[in-house]
Amino acid sequence: MSTTELPFPGLRGVPTNDEPQTRKEYTSDQEVRWCPGCGDYAVLAAVQGFMPELGLRRENVVFVSGIGCSSRFPYYLDTYGMHSIHGRAPAIATGLATAREDLSVWVVTGDGDALSIGGNHLIHAMRRNVNMKILLFNNRIYGLTKGQYSPTSEPGKVTKSTPAGSVDYPFNPVSLALGAEATFVARTIDSDRRHLTSVLSAAAAHRGTALVEIYQNCPIFNDGAFDAIKNRDTKADAIIPLEHGQPIRFGSDGQYGVVRDKDSGQVFSVEVADVHESDLMVHDAHATDPTTAFALSRLTDAGVLHRAPIGIFRQVERPTYDDQARAQIATAAQGQDDATAALGSLISGSDTWTVV
Amino acid sequence: MPKQVQQLDRVIIRFAGDSGDGMQLTGDRFTQESAAFGNDLSTLPNFPAEIRAPQGTLPGVSSFQVHFADHDILTPGDAPDVLVAMNPAALKANLADMKPGTAIIVDSHDFSARNLTKAGYVESPLENDTLADYALTALDLTGMTVAAVKEFGLSRKDAARAKNMFALGLLSWMYGRPTESTVSFLERRFAKAPDIRDANITAFRAGWNFGETTEAFAVQYEIKPAPMPAGTYRNITGNLALAYGLIAAGVQSGLPLFLGSYPITPASDILHELSKHKRFDVTTFQAEDEIAGVGAALGASFGGALGITTTSGPGLALKSETIGLGVMIELPLLVVDVQRGGPSTGLPTKTEQADLLQAMFGRNGESPVPIVAPQSPGDCFDAALEAARIAITYRTPVLLLSDGMLANGSEPWRIPELADLPTIDPAFATGPNHTTDAGDPDFWPYLRDRETLARPWAIPGTPGLEHRIGGLEKGDGHGNISYDPANHDFMVRTRQAKIDRIADSLPPLDVDDPDGEARVLVLGWGSTYGPIGAACRRVRKAGLSVAQTHVRHLNPFPKDLGEVLKRYDAVLVPEMNLGQLSLLLRAKYLVDVVGYNHVRGLPLKAAELAEAITDLIGTTGDDVQTVVDPVETTEKESVR
C-alpha cells in the first residue's frame, strides 16, 4: 500500500511499512542526556510513541536539527538524522525535502535556534511551504549556553546576560509564522501528551510546512515559565483551546469566551455572561486569509505567561515548493531517455566549426 | 574601388561605449564571427558594476576586447591595435591603454559639447592634437545608422540604438569576418519585434557596405584561420563551460544535481544556465541567502544528490560554517567561488585571485578542503568534472576557484568526446559493514575505505543503515558523539589524511621547459595561465630559457611539486593577489619563491610579466647572455 491512499497528503510519496512498528524500533542506542525533568523527554516520548502509528518505512524518516538542547533530538531516534549547525536546519531540510519526495522530513529546533540565529531560514521555509514539519521547542531561554534570555523571553527578564532586566521585546512564534503565511501553524504543550500527539498527527498529515510551537519547560534556567497553563488549578482559565468549527470558550466552567470587535477586527477574551453566546467566535482553522488566526495569536501574553491559545491556528492547502520544483523537472525530462546524447547536443550548441 | 588586402597574423580590437550602447553584444558577435572563421581568440569583457551609470560619463563606460589570430594565442592582449569609441567618455577612459599608432575609430556624432563636458574634455580631442599619435578615423556612425534604417519608421532614439550593429558591420568588413551567424543571431534575438530586427540587420549590412565603398579605409585585413588540433569547436565563456561541466558531472555520476545559490556577481550566470537544464535532473534553488544556498545543497547531498553552491568571495565568507559541517559529516559538496576584487564588496565586476587563502583556511578548527582551479574559460568544464570526482569519491566539500576573468572571458573550445569523459561512481552504501559484539549485522557510518579513507555514503531510504550525523566530533568507526581526547586527535588527523590522499589520484605536474636549460620556473594557478604562457613565449623568443608550470590542484598539491620547485634556481609566482600561493609554497616546501603580484582588477599584462621574468633570469647563474629587451622585439606572440 502506498501512502497516496492514506488520508495523509503530507506523507504522499513516502513508502509505508505493512508490519506493525513499535516505539522500541524508533529508539536509538544512545543514552539520552537532557537534564532531569526537562520537557524534552516528554516530547521525545510522544514522538517515539507516535511515529509507529504513521506506519512509514523507518528508513524514509529523517530528523534534521540545529543547535541547542532540543537539537540533540535526532540522536535519540533510530531514523536517519542530521544534527546540523545553529539556525540552519530549515535550509538543510529544504534541500533534502526538495531532492527526495519519498522522505518524511522533520525539523527539531528551539526558540534561539529558529527565531534568533535562524529566523531568516524559518520564515522563508514557511513562505515557500516546503514539505517539512518543524517542531519548535520554546522554553523562552537559552539552555545549552547556560541561561541567557532568548527572543521569546519576557521583557524585563533577569538573566546572566541581562542583570538589569532584558529590554528586548519578544517574538510570538505563532504570530511570526502566520505573518509568513505558513499553511499550518499550531501550538501545544510538552506535558499534555494527548494534545501533543494529536497536533503532531495533524502536522504529519499536512502537505507543506507545518510549524508546531511546543511550550517546553526548562527546569534549570527558566523553571515555571509555563506554570499558569500547566498547573491543575489555573490551566482551565489560562488555556484558550482552539478547535476547528467549535466556539472558542474556556475557563473551569466555560465561563470565558473570545469575541471579535467588528470595527477594529481585534479579538478579546470576555466573560460569556457579558455577551450573547452567539457573539462567541467559532474557530475556522481553514480560513484562507490568515488575518483571524493572527488576531487569535495576539491573545498570547508577551510578558510572563498567564494565558495563551493552544491548538491549530491555521491549516490550509497551498501548493508546496518541493512538489512544484519536482513537477518542473518531470515535465522537462519527459521523452528524454538518453542523457548522454542530450549532453552531447547541449555542450555542442548551435555555432560550431570543425578543424580537420 | 578595389581595396588592398593586407595580411596580419593577429589583431586586438577594443569596442568601447556607454553601458547602454551594446558594446558587450557587439564584442560577443565579433568574437562569434571570428570563432566561426577559425581564428584562435581570447576575450576580455570589462564593464561597470552599475547597471546604468549616468549616460556619457566615465564610470558608465563598458568595453569588450577581443584578440584573434592565425596562431595559438593565450591572452586577450595587453594593448589594442584598434579602439572603437562610441562617445568621448569611451575614448577618454581607454586612451591610456593605447600605444602610439593605434587605429582609433570614433562616432563623431556623439562628440557634442554636452558629451565632451560629461567626459571632462574642455575641447574636442578630434579638433586638437590630443590624438596626433594615433590613426584617427572620425565617422558619423549614428547619423549613417539613422539614415540607413529610415525606412522602418523607428523613433530617432530606437534608430540610433542600432549604431553598434553599424560599427560591427564596418569592423566585420575590415577584417573579413563571415556575417551569416550575426544575421541569423539578430533574426532570433528580435524575432518578436520585426522592425527592430530589420533595422539591426540593415544597420549591420550598411556598416559592411560603408567599409567596402568609403575612401576612409583603403585597406582590408586578412587574418587566416589558426591551425588547431582536429575536432569540433565552439566559442565558450568560463561560466557556461563550468555550468556544462556540472551537468556532465551529473550525467557521468548518475546523480541528480541540486544547486542552492544566491545571486552574486560574477557567479549568477551559472545559476541562470543550470536553471534552464532541468531535463538533466537539475534542481536549482534560489535561496534566501548564501547560507541557505549551501545548506540546502548539503541537505540534498545527504539525500543522495550532488549538492552544489555557486558564489563569489563575500558569499564564500557566509558559507564557511556550513562547509565546516560538510567537512565534519563528510558528504560530497561542490562550492564554486567565482572570485572578484575584494575585500568586502570590493570590485564586483573585476577579476582577482585573492580568495585562495579563504578557500584554504577560512573555517574554524582543522578543516581541510580540496581546492581545484581552472586555467582558461574552456578548462572550467574539465575542472568542474574534476572537482565533482573528488567530492564524490572522497565524500568531502570541494572548492572550485574560478574568477571574473575566466567567467566572462571566452575562447574556442574543442568539444570533448563524451566517451573520453571520466565516469564517477557514487558507490552508495547498500548494506551493513560491521558486526556487533552479539554477532548482529550493523552499520558504522565512519568506517572508512582503506585506500581513500572515504566513509560510506548511506542515503535515507536505505533500510538497515539508519544513522545520525552532525557537527559534533564523531567516534572513529561507529560515528557516535565522542568527547574522548585521543579520538579527537585521531579524527582530526584522519580528516587531514583523507584530503592528503587525494594527491595519490593526481597526475604529475606538466612542466614546460622546451630547451631543458631553464634556471627559472614560472609557476601559476587559475586564470593567469594565459598571461604567464604569453610572457614565457616572449622571453624565449628573446633567446632566454624559462620553464613554466601551472598548478590545478591547490589542495592537496601534486606529489611532485616540491621536487619540481627545488629543480630551479628561482621560482616566480605571478598572482592577482599579494602572494597567497607564494605563502603556501614557502610554508610547505621552504622554498624562497619570488612573487609577482598585481591587484588591478584586470588580467596580468604579458609584456610586464615578461620583463619581470627576464629580470629574475638576470639574477640567476653567472653565464647570462646579453639580453635584448623582449618587449621591444617580441610584441607579437609566436607559435610555440
Image (cartoon, coloured by chain):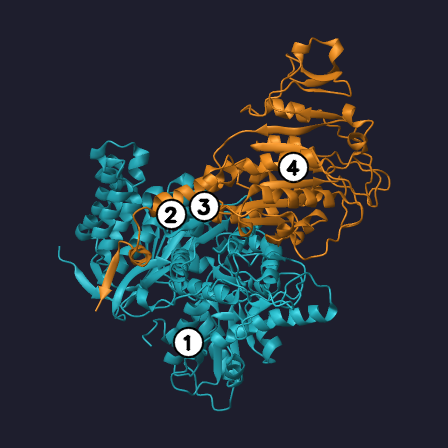
Chain colours: A orange, B cyan
Q: Residue furthest bottom?
A: B623
A354 versus B278 height, above or below: below
Instruction: Report the chain holding disc 1.
Output: B
As measured in the structure, the alpha-carbon distance from the residue carrying label 2 to the one carrying label 3 is 31 Å
- Asked if disc 4 and disc 3 are in contact, CB closer than 8 Å, the reply is no
User: Residue A214 appears at what percent x and percent y?
Assistant: 69, 37
Q: Are marks 1 and 4 in contact (CB under 8 Å)?
A: no
Quarter the N terminus of chain B occupies: bottom left
Residue B55, image x, y percentages = 43, 41
Q: Given the image, on which type of amino acid does mark 2 rest?
A: Lys
Residue count near mark 4 (Cα–Cα under 10 Å), binned few <14, some 14–19, many ≥20:
some
Question: Which residue is identified by label 3?
Answer: B60
Nearer the observer, A186 or B154: A186
Which of pointers 1 and 4 indicates the residue nearer the eye? Answer: 4
Pair 2/3: label in front: 2
Residue position marked by numbered label 2 in the rendering: B276
* Residue bearing the label numbered 4: A197
Q: Residue at x 67, y 20 (%)?
A: A248
Q: Could you tell me the amino acid type at mark 4?
A: Thr
**What is the count of numbered marks?**
4
Q: Quadrant of residue B360?
A: bottom right
Considering only order in the chain, which callout, 1 or 2, is on the residue closer to the N terminus? 2
Q: Residue at x 76, y 45 (%)?
A: A142
Q: Earlier in the sequence, mark 2 or mark 3?
A: 3
**Alpha-carbon distance for marks 4 and 2?**
43 Å
Q: With B506 as the anchor, is A77 left or right in this view?
A: right
Q: Secondary structure at mark 1?
A: helix
Mark 2 secondary-structure assignment = loop
Give the residue pinned by disc 1.
Answer: B536
Image height check: is B57 above or below B529? above
Q: Residues within 10 Å of mark 1 (few under 14, many from 20)?
A: many
